[in-house]
Image (cartoon, rainbow, N blue to C red):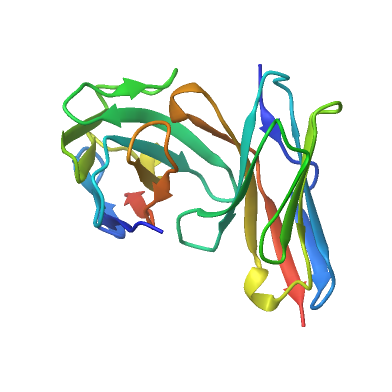
């Protein structure tokens, strides 16, 4: 079936380094993606989104890249900080507002 | 962003009892609310979509008679887990949106433990 999945379940980075979290999707018709951050015991928090008419979008310390050819998107976090430690999910926003979440990547930041 | 609350944040109940979880949009009117379920170290799985004043739309495999959803007002949706069993233990998260096509704002989640 169709899915949105992540390549790696865990990622450990040194404080100050850049982090890259990847996500693959299978539905070539997908046209809107969102990245969420979820801290332990809390609900997801919106980070950044991107539509299929773009291949890159930047926010504060974060950049999302979308490669429609290989159906892949990534979240880049610059100068990763301890407060960035969390689980990161990509999600596909489908018709009717339905969100299909990927499996998640747990980011750990080492001081 | 907009604020969504859930109550209770944690609940422990005995097997066979029913538990009600509330989801409130505090500073906006939410035509659409969504209910998700999340197991430990797993992703969020959409359970159902509720529109104010209408019956909820359940995802495939979700028992509507077991997970009763009511969205009677533009600021409140409730999820009732009926005749709860240990396998219903999970983290339940709601989200609220102005409409189905607007950004979803997530609640903090409710941890349900069924003994």
Q: Is residue B63 visible?
A: no
Residue at point 36%, 36% (across, down): B34
Q: Is residue B38 visible?
A: yes
Residue A12 % position (x, y) = 80, 65
Residue A43 % position (x, y) = 45, 55
Residue at point 51%, 45% (across, down): B39
Depth check, front residue: A31 or A1: A31
Depth check, front residue: A70 or B45: A70
Residue A49 % position (x, y) = 62, 45
- Quadrant in the rendering for residue B7: bottom left
User: Considering only vertical position in the picture, is A79 above or below A9?
Assistant: below
Depth check, front residue: A3 or B3: B3
- Quadrant in the rendering for residue B36: top left
Depth check, front residue: A85 or B64: A85
On the rendered image, what quadrant is the C terminus of chain A found in?
bottom right
On the rendered image, what quadrant is the N terminus of chain A found in?
top right
Residue at point 71%, 35% (across, down): A5
Residue A74 % position (x, y) = 77, 46
Asked whether, in this view, residue A48 is left or right of residue B112, the answer is: right
Residue at point 26%, 28% (across, down): B51
């Amino acid at each position: 079936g169709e899915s949105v999945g992540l390549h790696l379940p865990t990622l450990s980075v040194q404080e100050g380094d850049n982090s890259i979290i990847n996500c693959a999707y299978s539905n070539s018709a997908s046209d809107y993606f969102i990245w969420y951050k979820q801290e332990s015991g809390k609900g997801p928090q919106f980070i950044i989104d991107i539509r299929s008419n773009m291949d890159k979008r930047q926010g504060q310390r974060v950049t999302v890249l979308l490669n429609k050819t290989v159906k892949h998107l990534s979240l880049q976090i610059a100068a990763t900080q301890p407060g960035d430690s969390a689980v990161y999910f990509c999600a596909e926003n489908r018709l009717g507002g339905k969100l299909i979440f990927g499996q998640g990547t747990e980011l750990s930041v080492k001081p | 962003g907009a604020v969504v609350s859930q109550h209770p944040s944690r609940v422990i109940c005995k097997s066979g009892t029913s538990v009600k979880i509330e989801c409130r949009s505090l500073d906006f009117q939410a035509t659409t609310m969504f209910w998700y379920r999340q197991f430990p170290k797993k992703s969020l799985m959409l359970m159902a979509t509720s529109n104010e004043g209408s019956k909820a739309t359940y995802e495939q495999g979700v028992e509507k008679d077991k997970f009763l959803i009511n969205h009677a007002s533009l600021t409140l949706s409730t999820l009732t887990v009926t005749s709860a069993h240990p396998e219903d233990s999970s983290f339940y998260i709601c989200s609220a949106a102005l409409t189905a096509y607007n950004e979803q704002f997530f609640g903090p989640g409710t941890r349900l433990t069924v003994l």
